[in-house]
Image (cartoon, rainbow, N blue to C red):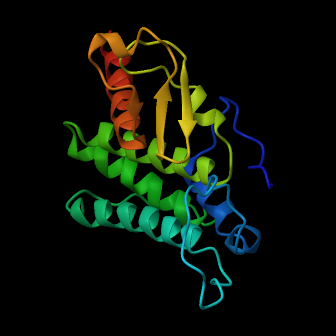
Amino acid sequence: MIRPSAASENGVQAPADLLDELDSPDWKRAGSTASGPRIGRSATRVHSPAPANTTVLDHLAACDGEVARFIAKARSAPAPGTEPGQPGRAAAYERARVQADDLGMDWPAYVAAMEWRHAASSALLMGDTDVIRREPCPACRTWGLIWVATHKAAMCVNRYCAKRGQPTMWTLAQLAAERAGRRLQRVAN
């Protein structure tokens, strides 16, 4: 399995870097991602599978489209000048951050959650499940989250977590929203 390249100084890669890495021919090749084991039976194939990894192509289009839609909604904010050597995806994320700061309110938290979700889903697509292990469980605040590929969700393995009435399975969107909320609390304190 191909592993993601070296992480930044805080151990987490930027979403633009991960998406640029996924945009390479190695990851677009059929069967290149860690999508987890197939459970159950399926019908006999009549046609050959696609020569490209459609999961990666769909993921790239979804992430790029979400950033583009956010920028289109926030067009009233002034656009920052991009540096000549800055890559396209990194410039798009930077523009989204600047426009979110200009819009104020909850928009910076939305962009932070979107960036983390894009980075985490890209890392999971490349087979790096450690990105989930670095997050505390939103219900019990322990470091017991593991990625369950068959459910496409993180599960808390703390046996006391389920007794609190909270869900023990968390989607990437829920974890991203919790992380963005926790980040704002940290700044407020």
Question: Residue 17's spot in the image, x, y percent?
Answer: 63, 54
Horizontal arrangement in the rendering, residue 82 relative to residue 78 (left or right): right
Label count reads 0
* Left or right: residue 129 compared with residue 99: right
The foreground one among 151 and 29 is 151
Q: Is residue 57 left or right of residue 13?
A: left
What is the x, y in percent for residue 99?
31, 51
Camera-side residue of 129 and 4: 129
Quadrant in the picture for the N terminus: bottom right
Query: What residue appears at the point 56 percent right and 61 percent down from the top-left corner?
Result: 83
124 above or below 89? above
Q: Nearer the viewer, residue 150 or 4?
A: 150
Please tell me whether residue 119 is drawn above or below residue 2 in the rendered image: above
| Picture residue at 52% right of the left edge, 48% below the top | 150
* Residue 104 visible in this rendered orientation of the protein: yes
* Image quarter (top left, top right, bottom left or bottom right) of the C terminus: top left
Rendering coords of residue 187 (x, y %) = 36, 18
Give the quarter of the image for residue 9.
top right
Q: Which residue is located at x 72 percent, y 40 percent?
A: 7
Answer yes or no: is residue 17 visible: no
Q: Relative to 112, is 79 above or below?
A: below
Where does residue 127 sit, x and y in percent of width and height?
A: 68, 48
